[in-house]
Amino acid sequence: MIDIESLIPHREPIKVITEIKEITEDGGSSTAVVNQGWPLCDGQAVNSMVLIEAIAQTSAAVEGYKRKVSGKDPIKGWLVGIKSAEFKTDRVALDTRITVVVKNLNAFESYAVIEGVVKAGDDLLLTAVLQAVRLNDEA
């Protein structure tokens, strides 16, 4: 199992992904179970905006893993913006198991465009395209 906290700067309570399922050359996937500790939780569900964070963290873990295996510091900060997002729900109930799949659409030096899909089983919750800029670009 891949240690997520060795790859991303996020910690509880903002860290939402719990397991990396796959890392490929151009993307990867993670899973998580929605719980009361998540941001934007009202005690019964979370606002689906937090799914954007799950995509960003999965992307950060993929990039961190690649940096780590190449001998670089894996944990780097990214400034992320939403280029587009299509939410299929406003809220996600507690105890919902989600799967996050990300794919790098374009990358150049410290800039990347990432496509992300979040599902609960077969139910599509979110498709989004994020833009990310690495803030601390030293080796």
Image (cartoon, grey):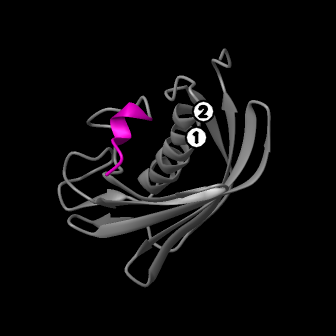
Q: Percent position (x, y) of residue 33?
A: 26, 61
Residue at the far top in the pictured view = 138
Residue 70's label in the rendered image is 2
Q: Is residue 6 magenta?
A: yes
Residue 39, percent from left and from top = 32, 44
Q: Residue at x 55, y 26 (%)?
A: 77
31 relative to 115 in the view: left or right: left
Please tell me in which quadrant of the rendered image residue 110 appears: top right
Alpha carbons under labels 2 and 1: distance apart: 6 Å
Q: 123 above or below 36?
A: below
- Range of the magenta residues? 1-7
Question: Can you name the residue that lies furthest to the bottom here?
Answer: 122
Image mark for residue 134:
none
**C-beta proximity under 8 Å, tags 2 and 1:** yes
Q: Nearer the viewer, residue 6 or 48?
A: 6
* Label 2: few (<14), some (14–19) or many (≥20) C-alpha neighbours in 10 Å: few
Q: Which residue is mark 1?
A: 66
What SS does tag 2 mark?
Answer: loop
Q: Amino acid at mark 1?
A: Lys
Under mark 2, the amino acid is Ser
Secondary structure beneath dot 1 equals helix
Mark 2 vs mark 1: give the one in front: 2
Q: Is residue 27 above or below residue 53?
A: below
x then y, percent, for residue 81: 65, 41
Q: Quarter-wise, where is residue 30 in the image?
A: bottom left
The answer to whether 26 appears left or right of 63 in the picture is right
Membership of 125 in magenta stretch = no
Density class for disc 1 (Cα within 10 Å; few <14, some 14-19, many ≥20) is some
User: Residue 139, how many percent across, how many down?
Assistant: 65, 17
Which residue is located at x 58 percent, y 33 percent?
A: 67
* Image point (42%, 51%), residue name: 50
